[in-house]
Amino acid sequence: MTLEQTLKQATVEIFNQQFNAGISADAVTINITNPDHEGDYTIVVFPLVKFSKKSPEQTAQMLGEQLKEKAGVIAKFNVIKGFLNLTLTDSYWLRRLNEISSNSAFGTFPPNGQKVVIEYCGPNTNKPLHIGHVRNMLLGFSMSEILKATGHDVTKVNIYNDRGIAICKSMVAYKRYANGATPQSTGIKGDHFMGDWYVKFNEVVVEEAKAIPNAPADKDEAQKLTSIFKEAQELLLKWEAGDPETVALWKKMNDWVYEGFQQTFKLLGVDFQKDYYESETYKLGRDLVNEGLEKKIFYKRPDGAVAVDLTPEGLDEKVLLRADGTSIYITQDLATAKLRHEEFNMDKMVYVVANEQDYHFKVLKLALQKLGYKWADGIYHLSYALVESPTGRFKSREGKTADADDLISEVLRIAEGKTKELGKIESFIAEEANVLYRTIGLGALKYFVLRVNPYKKIIFNPEESIDFHGHTGPFIQYTNARIAAIMRKAGESASLDNVSGYSLSAVERELIILMSEYENVVKSASDKYDPSEVANYAYNLARTYNKFYHESPILSAEKPEEKIVRVALSGQTGVVLKKAMNLLGIEVPEKM
RNA sequence: GGCCCCGUAGUUUAAUGGAUAAAACGAAGGUUUCCGGAACCUUUGAUAGCGGUUCGAUUCCGCUCGGGGCUACCA
């Protein structure tokens, strides 16, 4: 039981015994004391005065006296209005530090038997990954690590939208204009190669549309009349009919794309245990919808389409199957979800998908629940907002600024430049230096993205490159490198058992309290599906450590027990920083 | 039109209904030859507006004003 829980429980017992309050632990508010006041933890007694029938001050005073008696770890307390500020004994905090230090699993929870399937990335295969995919992938990967830390059995899956008219557009342009060029022959990364032909298609279709006599005013309508557009449509039909030549080209081009994607995944450090392909699932779901039809959960509209009425849930009528009996997006998603449940028997299914699809996932979950699938309750849409430029949404045509690979090489380039400028790694061989640039560059990028609450949009100005100072990944990495340097010089760590008489300074105490909170932060981030809580925590810890570092001699401390405590504090801060950063998918270097 | 999300210092972000709203960047000034200055310390400055609930509201509710999204037999 954590100390907060202990204090809550003790408060509950006091109130229930003396005032017959009948409250439970969650009725007690306890938090870390505001830095402006003296104390470690604060109990807010306002909600409790209705039981004690005394003033807030009297209630707090009474509670403080009794808690001090009961808990045995409270050195003193003070009361300000309805706030009871408790100061714990130094020996309690030193014991706590010892406990944390000697538990290598601190911050990770035992297996809870819960299986989670998490789907993320979900790219289209007709163009390269962009900054939105980067946010998606970083969220998906980090969330997986956090769920693992809280005891879940996690399976990461990806789904490739590998079919449809968009892919056919790239294929047509390729057939017409490429003369057999390949990524190998041109030296262009496969996914970019595919994207280039998609761009080419769009250029040609615009040109052709201009040339059409009496073209419709509506641009889309005009483009549909062009020969290149018609070719794309024909290609789609051929593909659906299984035309060998078309399927072979489709496969060849998609393979180029996958090869390109793999490079980006590897660079970013994200991975998947299983891949799904829309080309294999796009026809599924018909049986499932018909099952709902038979159970009279869904109904057939006069026009023949099958729909579900979601107006009782505050949504609209939603079509689930076309009148001609073919699947649409929602149909195959219903089927894929069921398929995954059969495969993995998961308790939770997390979809990391942009908030444009909030409505879609509400429908998906409701429809499955209406079909009577209990496991559908475990569906969670980890919705995140778009990454935008200061002038609004990133458009593909704005070019390199939104491209994932360009963004990554940009931060790596900055990392290299800054590192060389500071000149601290002369002893590194080239390979080590390159690994370091990658660690720092990706640390900056990942932290930049993950520190923001997922539901908030991120404004990214490509003109101002990602920062390496202040509230950033490199700042936290630097703090760890600094700690590592201390630890190298400190040598063998001494036991904390014999320093029980030590008197903690304010910042030392603050550090232990913060580290002590780590497991709560992990749990909370997991429950809320929010890696930004971990990111902000890591920053606070690093900042507090730097403050400590500047005001406290460590290796050159005067008294032996000072040195022992401060070295232990440093080492453990490094350990917790590393754990937290790893949950974000960020490495921390020993030197930088 | 209907539904959903967002609005906090000049900028980018924090704050389970709790104390005088916290940081970073920017700007200005500083850090005992200091264990790593990618650091530390000062100064500067904000809850879009109006009501309501509450002992207490950035947080919950309503309205207004801004920004974005969804509202396909597209994905």
Image (cartoon, rainbow, N blue to C red):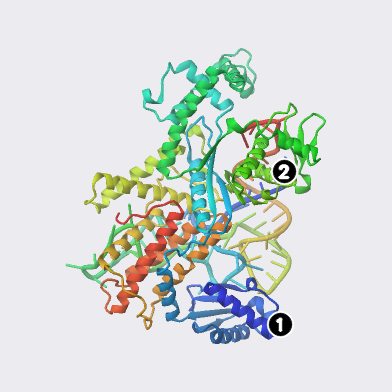
| Disc 1 crowd, CA 10 A, few/some/many (<14, 14-19, 20+) | few
User: Callout 1, which amino acid?
Assistant: Asn
Q: Which of marks 1 and 2 is nearer the N terminus?
A: 1
Residue sitting nearer the eye, A117 or A430 = A117
Q: Mark 2 points at which residue?
A: A367
Whether residue A40 can be seen here: yes
Residue A343 image point, x, y percent: 60, 43
Residue A399 lies, with reference to residue A144, above or below; the image says above
Q: How many marks?
A: 2
A415 relative to A564, above or below:
above
For residue A29, what is the image quadrant?
bottom right
Amino acid, disc 2? Ala
Residue at mark 1 to residue at mark 2: CA–CA distance: 46 Å
**With A271 as the anchor, is A312 left or right in this view?**
right
Quadrant containing the N terminus of chain A in the rendered view: bottom right
Q: Check residue A20 in the rendering and tell me which mark sits there, or answer none.
A: 1
